[in-house]
Amino acid sequence: MAVMSSLKIFVQKYPITRGMITYATMWPVSSLIQQTLIEGKNYKNYDYWSAARFSFYGGMCVATSLYGWIRLSSVIWPKNNFKTAITKALVEQVTYGPVGLSMFFFGMTFLEGRGIQKSVDEVKDKFWPSYKVAICVWPVVQTINFTFIKESNRVPFVSMCSMLYTIFLAHMHSLKPEDLIMNQELLLA
């Protein structure tokens, strides 16, 4: 019990750690769910290194940048009403969203040891198809977040919502460029 009490005090003193812990847990779970859904893997065949990269990236990159964005947006737009929530959600989609998505594809590819050029190519290939989905999902989620969720719980709330989106990102990241072209052709047909 003393450990849990100390952890609670630590998280209250350093609120960014709440999001870091949440994302470092939720992102690898999303990776494993994606592996199960797409590849039908069982626990003996999972790519645990991929899940570890998702944990590192989620906890260290996503949580910290999202924490900064939410704090900044709360300073710029301090009101908690529907109009402000929509403003924050829309601004996020044209500022944080593209940067976060580019960072994800670049960062995950780089963490795999595939080099800078492959990381840049990953962003070029997968940014737009992923961003089209993001602009359908995140304005709604963030409007709810900025309207109804207490500021201290916004990052954990978003991380829970992002679990489904992260499964999608894990799937997009796992696709080869030729798979993307084929999927786009099927959508246009």
Image (spheres, grey):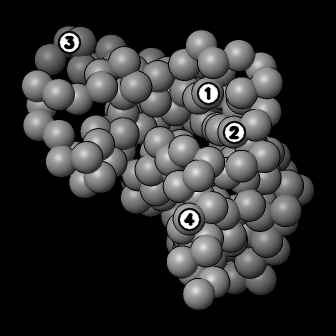
Alpha carbon separation for disc pair 1 and 4 = 21 Å
Q: Is residue 147 visible?
A: no
Task: Give SS at disc 3.
Answer: helix
Alpha carbon separation for disc pair 2 and 1 = 7 Å
Task: Give SS at disc 1.
Answer: helix
- Closer to the eye: label 1 or 4: 4
Task: Give SS at disc 2.
Answer: helix
Q: Measuring from the top left, give residue 161's x and y in whole percent.
A: 44, 59
Amino acid beneath label 2: Glu
Alpha carbon separation for disc pair 1 and 3 = 40 Å
**Mark 1 in CB contact with mark 4 (< 8 angstroms):** no
Amino acid beneath label 4: Met
**Mark 2 in CB contact with mark 4 (< 8 angstroms):** no
**Mark 2 in CB contact with mark 1 (< 8 angstroms):** yes
User: Which residue is tagged 2?
Assistant: 122
Q: Earlier in the sequence, mark 4 or mark 3?
A: 3
User: Which residue is tagged 4?
Assistant: 182
Is 184 drawn above or below residue 166 in the view shown?
below
- Closer to the eye: label 2 or 4: 4
Alpha carbon separation for disc pair 4 and 3 = 55 Å
Quadrant in which the C terminus is drawn: bottom right
Residue at figure coordinates x 52%, y 32% from the top left: 58
